[in-house]
Image (spheres, rainbow, N blue to C red):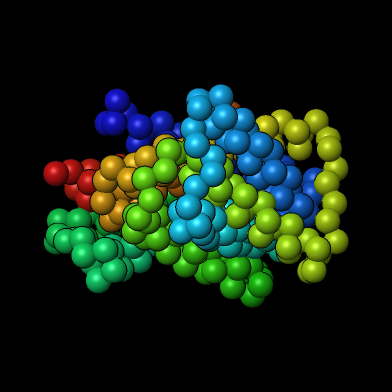
Amino acid sequence: MLKILPFIFIVLWSSAFITTKPIIDNSDPFAALAFRFALVTIGFFLFSIYSNQKIIVSKRNFLESFLSGVLFHGFYLGGVFYSISKGMPTGIAALIVTLQPVLTNALSGPILNEKVSVKQWVGVLLGFVGATLVLGLDVGTKIPLAGVVATIIALLSITFSTIWQKKLSNNLPLSVSNFYQAVGGCLFHVFIIIFFVEPYINFTKTFIIAMSHQIFLVSFGAFTILMFLIKKNSASKTVSIFFLIPATSAFIAWFFLNETLTNLDLVGFLIATIGVYIATRN
């Protein structure tokens, strides 16, 4: 079962890129994320109660999970959503965030004492090259400075949240840990909309469908799988699978949205797959 989970995660996480734009088109990004994680919080709370998990935890365990949620659901997702809302091309935003495995590999050695082999670095390099070929770069596109800054913040946040999650001392059940992480993400976005933005959400049919997808398939499904993989594997190996997300997103967009899938996309997908295989194999 453990071997198939990365593939399920890749498909679910990749599909989120398809539904992000419809959400942003119908809402303020921070209001949308506050709404999303309010519902996710309720969902994980009810599931924890239903499965007889202990909700009340130690102060240390609470803070560790809460801050992990602030980093992952707050700064990372907030940065990505905000950058796209400011006109940042989705492909370039995804390319910047795709640098995460490179940073994680570089930091997991000194911070987590994980040994990153030469083969892993070769795999990471191939993975990044493949992802770059799939995403491409529109040189003529005007890139907003606010979008670049927000995407870099998102990159740093997902990198440190992955390393932080691996360093956590608690052994909380996934549903309980995810509950407190969702609380952290929700409160982060509530803070933003109270002090910095004028929130709005248009509950159109498109928004409801896209938001339902991100709540059930991404937050409940993909994120839980990611937390499980980080717990079971090394951080450097786990994040290498992120290189397959741009290519998988391109395939999903081609299949469901009739977007063009070029030969360069296929070459990039092949190179990224080889890189991920090299980086993650024993």
- Quick check: 265 left or right of 150? left
Does the image show residue 130? no
Tell whether 138 sits left or right of 123.
right
Q: Residue at x 63, y 41 (%)?
A: 41
Please tell me which residue is depicted at 60% across the width and 55% down the height of the picture: 184
- Quarter placement of the C terminus: top left
Q: In which quarter of the image is residue 88?
A: bottom right
Q: Nearer the viewer, residue 178 or 171?
A: 171
Residue 117: image location, x then y, percent: 14, 60
Q: Reply above or below: 252 against 109.
A: above
Q: Which of 275 and 229 is in front in this view?
A: 229
Viewed as shown, does residue 252 lie left or right of 196?
left
Q: Is residue 212 visible?
A: yes
Q: Horizontal and vertical percent for residue 233? A: 26, 46
Query: Which of the pair 264/248 is nearer the observer?
Result: 248
Quadrant of the rendered structure where residue 168 is?
Answer: bottom left
